[in-house]
């Protein structure tokens, strides 16, 4: 299994440009999430999905869109990039099982995005 | 607001020494508490997951403890190695199971540096 894969690894955008960060998992996991990680802060949830066709907002959803048309893929779209979206983005996936919600969560390698 | 606070922010130790990292949380009720290791430039990797009814969990040289009464957890690393240099992140899941997905609260992490 490749696990959770993310592309691209690095990206530079100009303010106002749009782009899609790709995330795929081959573990047949129901749950998938997008996080951003900024210096000195914990990971913050952007959007998440509990299954194909189902998405919901996390803590910091503004400026981002997601869709989940298949179990495997969960792309994150930046509609109009802003410097405040400069960050490292992580995708994660997990099963919807585990005693007490203790499902194992697997993270991708991250995409480092710079918006100028 | 649910919070997870980690201390110290950073720590430097010599190879072979032990260390303990702290996590205090205000999330209540909570379902489980996780510790992740994040190497520079990589995604977080799970070390331990403890449900609210567990008070210790080991993974090799890593031992996590949990005191649900005081809302404190610690991660003890024994006989540190250079490869232990990383950020260690405490994560708390609120509520009671699957419906809590998407509400994980991340600490800001403790950066551990192990010197030879």
Image (cartoon, coloured by chain):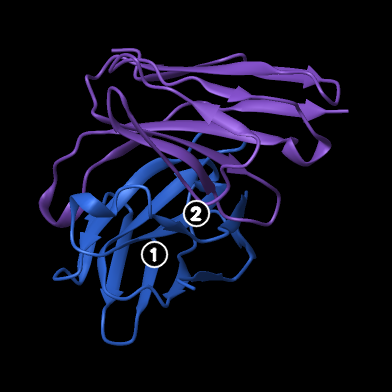
Mark 1 surroundings within 10 Å by alpha-carbon count, few (fewer than 14), some (14 through 19), many (20 or more): many
Vertically, is A116 above or below A10? below
Taking the spot 33% from the left edge, 87% from the top edge, the residue there is: B70
Q: Residue B88 got which mark?
A: 2
Q: Quadrant of residue A49?
A: top left
> In the image, is residue B106 above or below residue B101?
below
Q: Position of residue A75 (x, y in %)?
A: 49, 19
In the displayed structure, does residue B59 sit left or right of residue B38? left
Residue extending furthest toward the left:
A99
Q: Residues within 10 Å of mark 2 (few under 14, many from 20)?
A: many
- Residue visible at 49% across and 71% down in the picture: B3
Q: Mark 2 near mark 1, Cβ–Cβ under 8 Å?
A: yes
Label 1 belongs to which residue? B75
Distance from the alpha carbon under mark 2 to that under mark 1: 9 Å
Is residue B41 something one can see in this rendering? no
- Mark 2 / mark 1, whichever is N-terminal: 1
Left or right: B22 in relation to B70: right
Q: Is residue B19 left or right of residue A39?
A: left
The hue of chain A in the figure is purple
Q: Is residue B101 visible?
A: yes
Among the chains pictured, the one given blue colouring is B
Residue B96 vertical position relative to residue A8 in the rendered view, above or below:
below
Helix, strand or loop at disc 2?
strand
């Amino acid at each position: 299994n490749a696990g959770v894969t993310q592309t691209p690894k690095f990206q530079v955008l100009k303010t106002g440009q749009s782009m899609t960060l790709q995330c795929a998992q081959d573990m047949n996991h129901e749950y998938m999430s997008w996080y951003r990680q900024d210096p000195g802060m914990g990971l913050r949830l952007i959007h998440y999905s509990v299954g194909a066709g189902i998405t919901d907002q996390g803590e910091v959803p503004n400026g981002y869109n997601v869709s989940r048309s298949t179990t495997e893929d969960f792309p994150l779209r930046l509609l109009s990039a802003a410097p405040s979206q400069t960050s490292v983005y992580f995708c994660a996936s997990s099963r919807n099982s585990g005693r007490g919600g203790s499902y194992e969560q697997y993270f991708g390698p991250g995409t480092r995005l710079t918006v100028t | 607001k649910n919070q997870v606070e980690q201390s110290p922010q950073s720590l430097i130790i010599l190879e072979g020494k032990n260390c303990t990292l702290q996590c205090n949380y205000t999330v209540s009720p909570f379902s489980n508490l996780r510790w992740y290791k994040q190497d520079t430039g990589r995604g977080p990797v799970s070390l331990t997951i403890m449900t609210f009814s567990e008070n210790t969990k080991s993974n090799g040289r890593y031992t996590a403890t949990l005191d649900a009464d005081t809302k404190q957890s610690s991660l003890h690393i024994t006989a540190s190695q250079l490869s232990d240099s990383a950020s260690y992140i405490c994560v708390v899941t609120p509520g009671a199971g699957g419906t809590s997905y998407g509400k994980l609260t991340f600490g800001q992490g403790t950066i551990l540096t192990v010197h030879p």
